[in-house]
Amino acid sequence: MDPLATPAAAPVRVLVVEDDPDDARHTFRALRRSGRFEPVHARTATEALEQAVAGAFGACLLDFRLPDMSGIELCRRLRELGIATPVVLLSSVESDSAADRAARAGADDFLVKHLRYGETLEAEMSRILEARHGCA
């Protein structure tokens, strides 16, 4: 092994908060495709809060609708706890008012889930991390 070669960067841990198993699987597949992201799953906002407080994540992907609170409320709570991790709200419905509410809650972006959103998601995560941390 070449001693001057730089080791590959460790994947960025991404907290994926999604209660729908199919959507979670699709999101995990999209994130893992590049090898740059390591998704960690939470099915509820309560579980996500516990994980976010306990562990370091490079980003959080929050489903807009969760069984115990909205993704918007979860984003607000993360910010109230002082967690500055980039947050992207995900919804299956495009809505300017939802995107505006997400931004007011402290989210970095709002994406609509669709058949090709995996490519969009990977690019968006890289863009947000580059802007926030200077890495992707």
Image: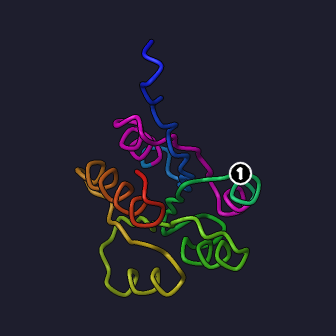
Give, as a single range, the part of the protein colored magenta. Answer: 24-49
Residue, disc 1: 55
- x, y (%) of residue 96? 31, 84
- Does the magenta portion include 31? yes
- x, y (%) of residue 36? 42, 40
Q: Quadrant of residue 35?
A: top left
Mark 1 surroundings: few (<14), some (14-19) or many (≥20) residues within 10 A: few
Task: Give the quarter of the figure containing the N terminus.
Answer: top left
Residue sitting at the far top: 1
- Indicate left or right for 54 with 74 as reference: right
Residue sitting at the far front: 4
From the viewer's perspective, is residue 8 above or below residue 55? above
The figure's colour scheme reads rainbow
Residue for point 29% across, 54% down: 123
- Does the magenta portion include 98? no
**Amino acid type, label 1:** Gly
Residue for point 26% across, 49% down: 119
- x, y (%) of residue 129? 43, 59
Residue sitting at the far left: 116
Residue for point 56% across, 56% down: 17
| Count of residue discs | 1
From the viewer's perspective, is residue 134 above or below residue 5? below
Residue for point 40% across, 63% down: 128
Secondary structure of the residue carrying numbered label 1: loop
- x, y (%) of residue 11? 50, 39
From the viewer's perspective, is residue 29 above or below residue 64? above
- Indicate left or right for 14 with 116 as reference: right
